[in-house]
Amino acid sequence: MAAADGKIKELLQPVIEALGCQLWGIDLQSGAKTKLLRVFIDREDGLIGIEDCEKVSRQSSSILDVEDVINGEYILEVSSPGMDRPLYEIGHYQKYIGEDISLKLRFPYEGRRNFKGRLTAIDGDEIIMVATDHEFLFPIEAIEKANVVPRF
């Protein structure tokens, strides 16, 4: 996690929890002129409403403006992680053992960066997944982006 992401998480987590939600993850993307800050929130029951997003957005915006942790202009977007929820931390992966995930590695492994398969286990700070009938072990820090593949 980048230093800015860590500072943003440190500032927003207590506020989001005080509003009855959980901070699922933060995604800060830099654009040509403005940055996009996506804040994903969740609840124990998994039911995030527009009202939750509005409350978290108002409070988060105020704190971020006062603390000025994002240089320049930014757009704040608060939402539920959704069915194809991004996975950020080892605890997130733990919740989805047995489910299909897709991931993109920071660097190629065996000539490819994208993998899709069944998450079968967690071993320390590494995930174990089966993709195309092969078992793969990936350190969490080698994963650039991972999402749950929704079942319909």
Image (spheres, rainbow, N blue to C red):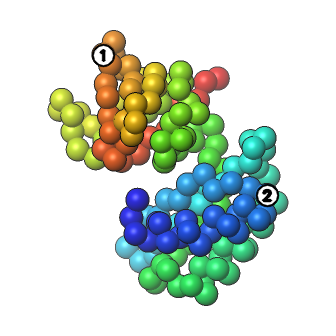
How much space separates mark 2 and mark 1, taking CA atoms?
Answer: 41 Å
First in sequence, mark 2 or 1: give its number: 2
Q: Which mark is residue 149?
A: none
Front residue of this view, candidates 80 and 92:
92
Say which amino acid is labelled 1.
His
133 to 24, vertically: above or below: above
Residue 1: percent from left, percent from top? 40, 59
Residue closest to the far left: 111
Q: Vertical placement of 133 versus 119: above or below?
A: above
Quadrant of the frame with the C terminus:
top right
| Residue 57 visible in the shown view | no
Task: Read off the residue under disc 2.
Answer: 20
Instruction: Identify which amino acid the numbered label 2 is placed on.
Output: Gly
Residue at 67% across, 81% down: 62
Viewer-side label of 2, 1: 2
Instruction: Work out which residue is located at the far top of the displayed protein and give it.
Output: 133
Residue highlighted by disc 1: 134
| Helix, strand or loop status at disc 1 | strand
Residue farthest to the right, as pictured: 51
Q: How many marks?
A: 2
Residue 107: % across, % down: 23, 44
Q: Is residue 137 left or right of residue 120?
A: left
Write the residue at 38% across / 26% down: 128
Residue 83: quadrant of the picture: top right
The kind of secondary structure element at disc 2 is loop
Q: Nearer the viewer, residue 144 or 122?
A: 122
Whether tag 2 and tag 1 are in contact, CB under 8 A, the answer is no
In the rendered image, the residue lying farthest to the front is: 124
Q: Quadrant of residue 38?
A: bottom right
- Rendered location of residue 125, percent (x, y): 39, 40
Q: Quadrant of residue 11?
A: bottom right
Question: Which residue is at 45% across, 25% downward?
Answer: 121
